[in-house]
Image (tube, grey):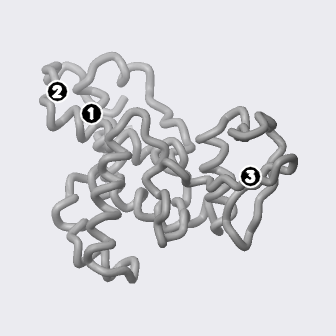
Amino acid sequence: MYWDEANIDHRELTARERQRLTWMMASLSLPKGGVRAAFADEMACVYRFAAVRWPEGPTCADCGRKDFAYLKMRKCLYCRKCKRQLSVTAGTIAHRSRLDLRMWFIAAEDVISAYAIGKEDAFLTGHDLAHRYGVSYSAAHRLKTRLLADLSDPKGIIKPSICVAEPNVPQDVAEFDWGLFVWAQAKVTGYFFGD
C-alpha cells in the first residue's frame, strides 16, 4: 500500500485536482521510453493514427471499398479501385499542418507531461515551444492551442493515438478519488509513500 489509509483524507477532489488527475492518468498511459521511442518515424505515427481513427479501416467515400494503399510521396492513402486520395489527418487537428504527425505526437507528450506534474506555465510558453520544436512563435502557439483542445476533448484523437499503455492501478487505490490522486501524483513525480 502507498500510504497509511487511516491518515488519508477521503475528501472529494476539487475541479482543478480532478482535471490534474486526468492529465496524470494520461501521463501514466504514455508508452514506456516515451513517444520518440515508441513511434520512431513518421510512418509509425501514420499507422497508429490511422488505426485509432479508423479501427475497421478507412472506407472510400466514392466507391465504398476498404482497399487502400499509402502514397509516401504525397503522404496520403488512395483507394486502389477508384484512385480517390485521402489524407490520414483530414478533418483532424493536424489537417493541413506543415508539421509532420510525429511532431504532433511529441508535442502532445510534452503537453501531457507538463500538465501532469503541474508545471504547464513554466514548461509550455510559446517562446519555449518555438525554440524546442524549431518553429515560429505563432506556429508554436497554434500547436499548443490545438493540442490542448484535442487532449481535453473525450473524442479527441491525439491522446488515444499516443496513450498506449494501461496504468496498473492497485485495487485499494481505485476505491476513492483522493487515493487515486495521491497514487497518480506519486507515480508521476516519482515520490512514493512506502512499499
Residue drawn at 55 percent across, 65 percent down: 102
Q: Is residue 86 left or right of residue 82?
A: left
Q: Which residue is farthest top?
A: 175
Q: Mark 1 = which residue?
A: 181
**Which of the image's four quarters has the C terminus?**
top left
**Which of the image's four quarters has the N terminus?**
top left
Residue drawn at 55 percent across, 54 percent down: 89
Q: Which residue is farthest right?
A: 81
> Horizontal and vertical percent for residue 154?
39, 33
Distance, label 2 to label 3, CA atoms, is: 50 Å
Residue drawn at 31 percent across, 71 percent down: 140
Using the rendered view, name the quadrant where residue 178 is placed: top left
Which amino acid type is shown beneath numbered disc 3?
Arg
The secondary element bearing badge 3 is classed as loop
The residue closer to the viewer here, 10 or 112, is: 112
The secondary element bearing badge 2 is classed as loop
- Residue 93, placed above or below residue 62: below
> Horizontal and vertical percent for residue 17?
18, 36
The secondary element bearing badge 1 is classed as helix
Q: Nearer the viewer, mark 1 or mark 3?
A: 3
- Binning the other alpha carbons within 10 Å of mark 1 as few (below 14), some (14 to 19) or many (20 upward) gives many
Residue drawn at 67 percent across, 66 percent down: 75
The residue closer to the viewer here, 79 or 58, is: 79
Which amino acid type is shown beneath numbered disc 1?
Phe
> Horizontal and vertical percent for residue 65?
81, 36
The first of marks 1 and 2 along the sequence is 2
Q: Nearer the viewer, mark 2 or mark 3?
A: 3
**Which circle marks residue 84 in the picture?**
3
Q: Mark 2 = which residue?
A: 13
- Residue 123, placed above or below residue 80: below
Using the rendered view, name the quadrant where residue 85 is placed: bottom right
Q: Nearer the viewer, mark 1 or mark 2?
A: 2
